[in-house]
Image (cartoon, rainbow, N blue to C red):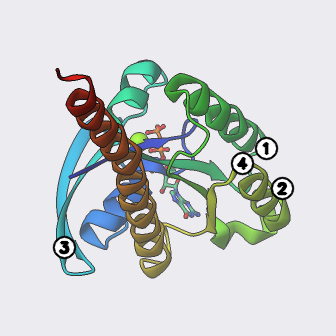
Amino acid sequence: VANVVVFGTGRVGKSALTVRFLTRRFIGEYGDIESIFSHNVIVDGRDITFNIWDSPETSLYEKRVQWADGFVLVYSICDRASFNAVTKLIQFIKDNLGMDKVPIVIVGNKKDLNHRRTILSEEGRLLAFTTACQFYEVTAAENYHSILMVFHRLIDRILASKTSIKRPAGIKGIVKSMSAVFTRK
Ligand SMILES: Nc1nc2c(ncn2[C@@H]2O[C@H](COP(=O)(O)OP(=O)(O)OP(=O)(O)O)[C@@H](O)[C@H]2O)c(=O)[nH]1
Ligand SMILES: [Mg+2]
């Protein structure tokens, strides 16, 4: 199971992206969907359940950060404020989880509106590079494949982070049981 939260400011395409991934379709208008969707996919032969929390709300940030295993942070390439918000969100998530390595994919959406672009691809790429996140530019309106890539890349990161968290715990467990052996009299 992987819990995924889709964050971003209003109207950047969070619901469009989520619905595209789940149904392969683009509807156009999504209203105020507030939902946790469940979706099964097979990745590397493993059956993974995605729980995706999509919401127009900017509240409940802490709660959703604690719930999530990974994040899709969406901005619109035509909306500077939405890009700045993603920059802040990354810091917020890392501070909240107290970790530097968090599975995060930054998504610049509405690539089809290239004539209205105000955020260069390089800016997105640089942000991802400096924060150790993944980065994609996509268009939920016109393309399914790149959105599939976003979620697959995220699941890779989530699975990798889960195994890397387990390892130190395992070592600690061994140290504990060893010291239990040596202190026994
Ligand atoms: N041109 C274009 N329009 C898009 C794209 N993705 C979403 N939209 C449009 O942008 C608007 C907002 O999309 P939503 O998916 O509702 O955005 P949201 O982030 O879920 O919005 P809230 O839930 O209100 O915060 C809708 O009119 C969509 O049709 C895209 O890739 N290209
Ligand atoms: Mg929405």
2 vs 3, front mark: 3
* Amino acid type at mark 2: Thr
Residue in view at x 32 percent, y 32 percent: 67
Q: Which label sits on residue 80? A: 1
Looking at the rendered structure, the secondary structure element under dot 3 is: strand
> Which circle's residue, 2 or 1, is located before the other in the chain?
1
The reply to whether dot 2 and dot 4 touch (C-beta < 8 Å) is no
Q: Is residue 12 above or below residue 113?
A: above
Q: Name the residue carrying label 2.
A: 118
Q: Which label sits on residue 167? A: none
Q: Which label sits on residue 46? A: 3
Looking at the rendered structure, the secondary structure element under dot 2 is: loop
**Alpha-carbon span between mark 3 and mark 4:** 29 Å
Q: Is residue 66 above or below residue 101?
A: above
The quarter of the picture showing ligand 2:
top left
* Amino acid type at mark 4: Thr
Q: Is residue 78 left or right of residue 144?
A: right
Q: Which label sits on residue 131? A: 4
* Amino acid type at mark 3: Arg
Point out residue 66 in the picture as x, y percentages from the top left corner. Answer: 38, 27
**Alpha-carbon span between mark 2 and mark 1:** 7 Å
**Alpha-carbon span between mark 1 and mark 3:** 39 Å
Q: Is residue 113 left or right of residue 71?
A: right
